[in-house]
Image: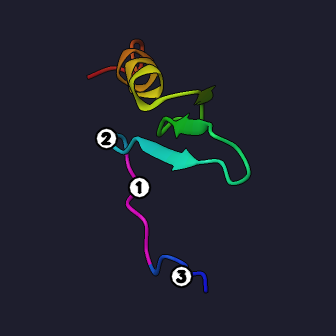
Amino acid sequence: MTVEPTRMLTGPGVLRVVWLPGSDRLQGTCHCGATYVADGPIEVWDWLLAHPIGHGS
């Protein structure tokens, strides 16, 4: 059974981390659409929190 979300947050402050089915990898997505695939949560969150440099405050 799969449950699809009925709504998703959007906007300049939304960062998303999802598990890639069939692997042990995580994909981080910035609100600008840039993505990064990592082996663990620390690596993907480090990238996400550093990536927005240049997006403005």
Which element is circle 3 on?
loop
How far apart are the two marked residues, 1 and 2, measured between alpha carbons?
8 Å
Q: Point out the stretch of residues depicted in magenta.
A: 7-11
Which residue sits furthest left? 57
Q: Residue at x 58, y 26 (%)?
A: 38
Amino acid found under the numbered disc labelled 1: Thr
Asked if 17 appears above or below 36 in the picture, the reply is: below
Which residue sits furthest right? 22
Asked if 13 appears above or below 34 in the picture, the reply is: below
Amino acid found under the numbered disc labelled 3: Val
Residue labelled with disc 2: 13
How far apart are the two marked residues, 3 and 1, measured between alpha carbons?
19 Å
Among numbered discs 3 and 2, the one appearing first in the sequence: 3
Amino acid found under the numbered disc labelled 2: Gly
Camera-side mark, 3 or 1: 3
28 or 57, which is in the foreground?
A: 28
Among numbered discs 3 and 1, the one appearing first in the sequence: 3
Residue labelled with disc 1: 10
Left or right: residue 39 versus residue 30 is: right
46 or 6, which is in the foreground?
A: 46
Residue 31 at x, y percent in the picture: 47, 40
Q: Residue at x 74, y 51 (%)?
A: 22
Characterize the local packing of mark 2: few (<14), some (14-19) or many (20 or more) Cα atoms within 10 angstroms. Answer: few
* Number of disc labels: 3
Quadrant the N terminus occupies: bottom right
Q: Residue at x 56, y 38 (%)?
A: 26
Which element is circle 2 on?
loop
How far apart are the two marked residues, 3 and 2, measured between alpha carbons?
25 Å
Which element is circle 1 on?
loop
Q: Is residue 10 rendered magenta in the image?
A: yes
Residue labelled with disc 3: 3
